[in-house]
Image: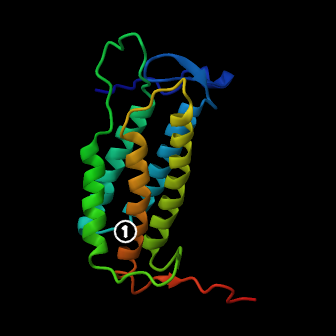
Amino acid sequence: MVKLDKIYTRTGDKGKTRLATGEPVDKWDARVTAYGSVDEVNAALGVAVLSAEGEMKAQLQRIQNDLFDLGADLATPERDKPLGFEPLRVVAEQTKRLEAEIDAMNAELAPLDSFVLPGGTPLAAQLHVCRTICRRAERDIAKLVSDESEIVSEHALTFINRLSDWFFVASRFANEKGEADIKWKPGANR
């Protein structure tokens, strides 16, 4: 269990932070960047939750918890020496749940005949903000995965990739099941 009794440590004053393993790293370390982007997704999602109701709200709150799991996963790199504790890792079931929810929402939506612009209802607009931040987090995690000196758990990148898809479908669902989507009109303002 997490116990925080002191909020400031002053290590950040010199541009350093510590991973969950205790090892010091630069604040701009690729791993810190990746879990920082995940934290941004979660903060934006907290705003979206304010506009959600019912099952959508419950789904968003589950995703917030999953994003904390992902942050903990990324903050705890695998190392050659034992950690002394069991690290929390994102698991395939979390991604499978997102896929099932995507499929259920998408089944109620008309197929797209154009790209949609971010907007419509307040919740849909906020979910688009979540989607774009999520895509950045995905790029940051993919960059971390591409570093041969780093080991990233096998489900982290898959989860964040699927989550950005989830946000897109959920934004359409929140737009009166696609009826309030704002469609892109190529070259409309030439």
Q: Is residue 119 above or below residue 148?
A: below
Q: Is 80 rendered above or below residue 130?
A: above
Q: Is residue 190 left or right of residue 89?
A: right
Report x, y in % for residue 119.
51, 76
The quarter of the rendered structure image containing the C terminus is: bottom right
Q: Quadrant of residue 14?
A: top right
Residue matched to label 1 = 170
Provide residue 19's location: percent of width, then percent of height: 48, 23
Q: Judge whether residue 41 can be spotted in this image.
A: yes
Q: Quadrant of the N terminus?
A: top left
Position of residue 13 in the picture relative to residue 45 (left or right) = right
- The answer to whether residue 178 is above or below residue 162 is below
Where is residue 64? Give x, y as percent.
36, 50
Residue 184, image quadrant: bottom right
Q: How many marks?
A: 1
Indicate the amino acid at tag 1. Answer: Ala
Residue 142 horizontal/vertical position (percent): 52, 42
Identify the residue at image location x=40%, y=79%: 175
Residue drawn at x 48%, y 60% is 131
Give whichever of 80, 49 is nearer the camera. 80
